[in-house]
Amino acid sequence: AQSVTQLGSHVSVSEGALVLLRCNYSSSVPPYLFWYVQYPNQGLQLLLKYTSAATLVKGINGFEAEFKKSETSFHLTKPSAHMSDAAEYFCAVSDPRSYIPTFGRGTSLIVHP
Amino acid sequence: DADVTQTPRNRITKTGKRIMLECSQTKGHDRMYWYRQDPGLGLRLIYYSFDVKDINKGEISDGYSVSRQAQAKFSLSLESAIPNQTALYFCATSDLLEGTGELFFGEGSRLTVL
């Protein structure tokens, strides 16, 4: 069985500060990993995904994430937060056998001026 | 037009009523999913379908049923709605040939059961 743990239901940063959203996963086989973003009153959209090609994955809007197998982590970062980054962020893991994703509980990113 | 369309976007109903949420997609994907989102609980899988004749229960299927009317259409029904089914429901699709399980989501259907 696979699972995802997102540390911190809320993360608050100042505009221009580093964004770090944490995700740890559990999977019995090498997984596929995703970060999705949900802006208010919208559906989820893909930020980036890890598919075993490169451990550092770059996504849209300046976000990136690094796959660390030894730590079973896939943390999301952005060097400088923007007000428009305020949203809910979900980490997900997909079993390479069934391709059915399991989601974390989400982290709400709050950006202060 | 959106690739994954959900109707209705908002619905308020009463306990005991039958409700259907509909989803249609133009992406040509074979796989379709229904998820439920609750604050603090993330997204939980209700049902998924790999093709028209293949429908499977997810982790929280009790109280729900689904129908895959065509490759492009996947509807979710609540036979007798109860207040704890108040939630935001998402339909999603994925392409088996893409090979990772990346999901494409609709805009969501917000259901309130009084």
Image: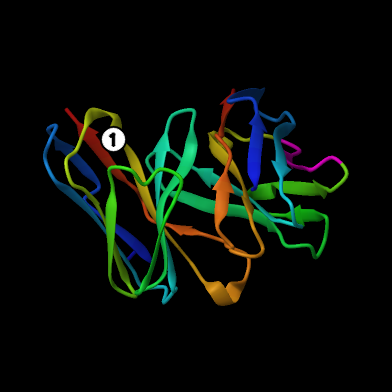
The residue lying toward the viewer, choosing from A27 and A21, is: A27
* B109 up-or-down from A22: above or below: below
Q: Amino acid at mark 1?
A: Gln
Residue B70: quarter of image: bottom left
Res A23 visible: yes
Q: Judge from the rendering whether residue B12 lies leftward or rightward of residue B90; answer left or right.
A: left
In this view, the residue farthest toward the right is A70
Mark 1 falls within which chain? B
Is A75 inside the magenta-drawn segment? yes
Task: Give how far across and how far down residue B9 sits, in percent.
Answer: 25, 47
The structure residue drawn at horizontal position 44% and vertical position 29%, both measured from the top left corner, is B39
The quadrant of the rendering that contains the C terminus of chain A is top right
Task: Give how far across and how far down residue A63 sits, in percent.
Answer: 69, 47
Is A13 inside the magenta-drawn segment? no
Crowding at mark 1 (Cα within 10 Å: few <14, some 14-19, many 20+):
some
Q: Judge from the rendering whether residue B23 lies leftward or rightward of residue B37; answer left or right.
A: left
| Predominant secondary structure, magenta span | strand
Magenta range: A71-80
* A86 up-or-down from B22: above or below: above
The residue lying toward the viewer, choosing from B20 and B107, is: B20
Residue B81: quarter of image: top left
Identify the residue position indicated by label 1 in the image. Answer: B85
Task: Give how far across and how far down residue B66 sits, in percent.
Answer: 28, 58
